Image: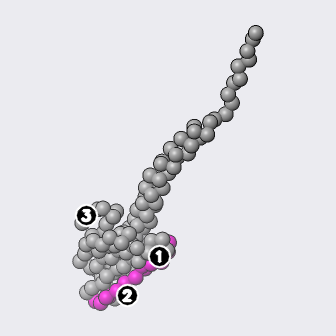
Amino acid sequence: MSMLKATQKGFTLVELMVVIAIIGIIASIAVPSYADYVKKGKAAEATATLADLRIKMEQYYQDNRTYVGGECSPGSGDRYFTYSCSAQTATTYTLNAAGKGDMSNFSFSVDESNDRNSTYDGVSGNCWKTSKTSSC
């Protein structure tokens, strides 16, 4: 008497559920980390642009002895932030970057004394914060 052995093909339901659980755990860690990474990249646009505009304002002051009429907007490249000047006089200015869209909880500013302020995803500081947990 010979008995034929049946061979198993495929996966059991338990094996499939274990794989799905592992993928879910990895995704729950990876997605928020990736979102924070993307926000850091977008926030870097604001700090780099404000630093560039500050240099242009100081160069304008050196040439004209006034900040009035200096360049307050990058002209292009403002995908995630809106740039503006406030309190612009002959001897003072404040450059502002206000987030737009999904970056609306972000804002950065710098003045003629290089005093920097920021709101990074709702957390304020007296510097340009690079993350929610960074200190000034």
Q: Main secondary structure of the magenta part?
A: loop
Q: Which residue is mark 2?
A: 69
Q: Which residue is mark 3?
A: 135
- Give SS at disc 3: loop
Instruction: Tell me: residue 134, above or below residue 94.
Output: above
Where residue 7 appears, as percent x and y from the top left, is 69, 24
Which numbered dot is residue 114? none
Q: Amino acid at mark 1?
A: Lys
Which numbered dot is residue 100? 1
Residue at the farthest top position: 1
Give the extent of the magenta segment.
73-90
Q: Is residue 78 visible?
A: no
Where residue 41 appears, as percent x and y from the top left, is 43, 62
Q: Earlier in the sequence, mark 3 or mark 2?
A: 2
Q: Label 3 vs label 1: CA separation?
A: 24 Å
- Could you tell me how many numbered marks the image carries? 3
Marks 2 and 1: which is nearer the front? 1
Q: Out of 16 and 97, give the one closest to the viewer.
A: 16
Taking the magenta stretch, the answer to whether it contains residue 78 is: yes
Residue visible at 48% across and 71% down in the picture: 102
Displayed quadrant of residue 133 = bottom left
Where residue 94 appears, as percent x and y from the top left, is 31, 82
Instruction: Tell me: residue 35, above or below residue 12.
Output: below
Residue visible at 44% across and 52% down in the picture: 29
- Packing grade of label 2 (10 A; few <14, some 14-19, many >=20) is few
